[in-house]
Amino acid sequence: MAASTDPIAEITAGYTFTTPSIDLGVLIADGAPVPATRIRLSLSMLNRHGLVAGATGTGKTRTLQLMAEQISRAGVSVFAADIKGDLSGIAIPGTSSEKLLTRTQAIGQDWKPEGCPTEFYSLGGQGTGVPIRATVSSFGPILLSKVLGLNETQESSLGLVFHFADTQGLPLLDIADLKQVMMYLTSDEGKPVLKELGGLSSATVGVILRSLVTLETQGAGDFFGETEFDTRDLIRTTADGHGVISLMELPNLQDRPAIFSTFLMWLLADLFHDLPEIGDVDVPKLVFFFDEAHLLFDGASKAFLDAIAQTVRLIRSKGVGIFFVTQSPTDVPDDVLAQLGSRVQHQLRAHTPKDAKALKATVETYPTSHYDLTETLQSLGIGEAIVTVLNPNGAPTPVAWTRMLAPLASMSQLDPTSMTQGVAASAMQAKYGPVVNRDSAYEMLTRKLEAGRAQAEQEAQAAQQAKEQAQAEREAQRSTPRTSTRTSTRPAPKSGVEKVLSSPTFWNQVIRVGGQVARTFWGTARR
């Protein structure tokens, strides 16, 4: 620290608030804690979002737990993505130890073990917890397109599929429903239905189906379906006024980051849609903590990143705060990072050129301070951090080297048996545990296609029978001898008498002889 000013007084004044606040820790000056200078974060600034960052093993998960505990005790609901299961102990009181008490006494913390009201959730039932599911219809074509990374043409085609399903009363509950509708609309029976609207390209449908299959391989098949979770159930308080902490278990997330992105997008979008506008408030309704945030952004499409940035920017007016927990600030896209008002930065390491570049970029984002942050950020001990937040007026507080307070709940994982028993006894499990498989687009269109196939088979069979019958009749006609029914117009041959009588010569002779006889009889004959 520089000696030209009194930095301790400056920092003390900068973190002295009259509004309700949570305590993060105490100031470190010249390597020693200053218990009288508490580093705080006003509850009214929680919905301006924040970042907790630091290298592996520097204490950022315990900082997340510390903040979640205090926010809960202030009557605010908390949701945290528990990637590694390290937060499950927050449900039970912590265990005292000599090392723990030595640390807490040095910073003036009156440590008393206390657990927090906790609800355990799992994504579609994968893991221990109340299953969280959502229907395909609740996603809608725009959000689903962003998750799948579709282009504009593919997005419009997906919108056409949703429009058809809505107008025809075909519920889209799971991925099987969506697939069946697309297959129907590209079949011979379904193509005429959308002809007036342009129809669906088989190539476009193929791209969408392949994207859906990829999403399914990461567990989306378990996430999409019913009973659909009502996100408003995340905002609950106990009878004594404590906010309920909802922990989402996400095992093996590193192998399936797309499902994490899918879930997050739906969760924030659904809350944004359902919650009323309340503007700036003294106490928020809900605070999110997303651990291992780099998994959320790695490989994400531009459309997805734009949607996250927009949601983070707008959801604060709904009384919702979001904190991203990751190893380095550079893990978070700039458009999102710019929306995060509070920063708790644990130790950064610069062992590689990439690390050094990230360290330099991090230092440049801090307000001017009395510290050489390039050196200080590499010198922080476990459980220490460089902190700057927004004061109740929305201005940045002085940068403060802080020793964080210790959580009051257990920092060990909860016993699996206790967790399973707690989930089984939960009212949320009774509400969302049952899997519902009601009649939807898949079943309806399957019956329609089967009926069409059956009718086509009947018609084909009838046509074949008619063809066979006609062939049989033709063969029968060819095998029967023909009898002529025509009357001959040729006269029958004349007999000898008829020939004589019809001869002119005969009649000339008759006349001549007859004439002579007559003349003789009448005496006129020649002599």
Image (tube, grey):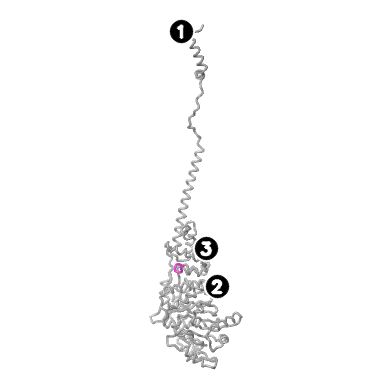
Q: Position of residue 313 (x, y in %)?
A: 47, 77
Work out which residue is located at the far left of the displayed protein and give it. 239
Residue flagged by tag 3: what amino acid is it?
Answer: Thr
| Helix, strand or loop for disc 2 | loop
- In the depicted view, which residue is nearer to us: 273 or 32? 273
Relative depth, front residue between 492 and 92: 492
Q: Residue at x 45, y 89 (%)?
A: 16
Which is more N-terminal, label 2 or label 3? Answer: 3
Name the residue type under label 1: Trp
Magenta span dominant secondary structure: helix
The label shown at residue 522 is 1
The image shows residue 455 at horizontal and vertical percentages of 45, 53
Magenta-colored span: 136-140
Mark 3 lies on residue: 204
What residue sits right under mark 2 in the picture? 299
Residue 324, percent from left and from top: 50, 79
Q: Nearest the camera: 335 or 516?
A: 516
Marks 3 and 2 in Cβ contact (< 8 Å): no
Pointer 1 local density, CA inside 10 Å: few below 14, some 14–19, many at least 20: few
Q: Residue at x 48, y 41 (%)?
A: 473
How many numbered circles are shown? 3
